[in-house]
């Protein structure tokens, strides 16, 4: 699915990966995760990130895709098709929570930042969420990593609070998290 709106960043295509990624996509996803973690992103891993751990993470995500509750988007460089960003939404499976989804692992390769790539990934996440009947998105990010709080605030996500020492940053320092949510307009 190509959701390029043609107005901004014509060099990037946003696409949903609906099945187990090809070997090339799998390797590029592992490269993306590694570059983000080693660049200081607090997204659930410590640096240096062993390749086997990056591969295992994406293997688990790929295994989830057939279940229908997880959506994995990638941003590709139009020239050559390399994966330079990704984002996920995990739709709640429990009967009492099927109106909500958790946004996970929004990341853009450090060399491609501030080109509205993550903003486009989030716009597509929200469009898919509305299509599926979700009315609430939430997410958990680091409070201290440069950019993530400002980024979600810029996209009109509401800061709900944070827990001190929630997780270690990639270099092992405890840091507070930041929980955000957004109420989506009904379809
Ligand atoms: C957060 C992240 C996804 C943003 O990706 P990006 O493609 O550079 O973001 P965008 O270009 O779409 O930014 C949209 C707006 O958010 C704000 N923003 C994004 N990054 C920012 C930064 N580092 N500092 C200040 N504001 C920032 C800006 O207002 C920006 O608009 P502008 O460039 O026109 O001013 C990226 O920095 C990243 O991958 N970080 C590491 C992973 C992470 O922490 N993910 C979030 C937790 S899940």
Image (tube, rainbow, N blue to C red):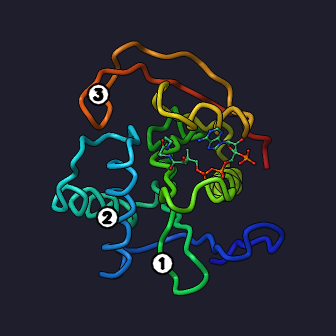
131 or 30: nearer the viewer = 30
Numbered disc 3: secondary structure: strand
Quadrant in the rendering for residue 31? bottom left
Ligand 1 image-quadrant field: top right
Verify CB contact (< 8 Å) between mark 1 and mark 3.
no
Numbered disc 1: secondary structure: loop
Position of the N terminus, as image quadrant, is bottom right
* Picture mark count: 3
Residue 26 at x, y percent in the picture: 33, 73
Establish if 138 lies above or below 131.
Answer: above
Left or right position of 54 against 32: left
Residue 129 at x, y percent in the picture: 64, 51
Establish if 103 lies above or below 115.
Answer: above
| Residue shown at the point (62%, 30%) measured from the top left | 181
Q: Which mark is residue 82?
A: 1
- For marks 1 and 3, the one nearer the N-term is 1
In the picture of the structure, the residue carrying the numbered disc 2 is: 30
179 or 9: nearer the viewer = 9
Which residue is outermost to the right?
7
Verify CB contact (< 8 Å) between mark 2 and mark 1.
no
| Residue shown at the point (52%, 44%) measured from the top left | 103
Q: Is residue 132 visible?
A: no
- For marks 2 and 3, the one nearer the N-term is 2
Residue 80 at x, y percent in the picture: 52, 87
> In whole angstroms, how far apart are the C-alphas of marks 2 and 1?
12 Å
In the picture of the structure, the residue carrying the numbered disc 3 is: 168
């Amino acid at each position: 699915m190509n959701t390029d709106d043609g107005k901004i960043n014509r060099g990037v295509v946003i696409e949903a990966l609906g099945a187990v990624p090809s070997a090339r996509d799998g390797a590029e996803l592992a490269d993306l995760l590694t570059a983000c973690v080693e660049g200081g992103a607090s997204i659930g891993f410590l640096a240096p990130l062993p390749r086997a751990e990056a591969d295992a993470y994406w293997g688990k995500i790929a295994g989830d895709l057939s279940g229908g509750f997880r959506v994995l988007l990638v941003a590709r460089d139009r020239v050559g098709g390399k994966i330079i960003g990704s984002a996920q939404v995990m739709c709640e499976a429990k009967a009492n929570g099927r109106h909500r989804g958790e946004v996970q692992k929004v990341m853009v390769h450090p060399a491609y930042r501030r080109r509205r790539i993550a903003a486009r990934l989030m716009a597509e996440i929200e469009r898919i969420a509305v299509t599926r009947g979700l009315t609430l998105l939430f997410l958990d990010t680091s409070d201290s990593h440069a950019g993530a709080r400002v980024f979600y605030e810029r996209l009109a996500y509401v800061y709900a609070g944070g827990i001190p020492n929630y997780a270690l940053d990639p270099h092992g320092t405890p840091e507070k998290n930041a929980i955000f949510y957004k109420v989506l307009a009904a379809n």
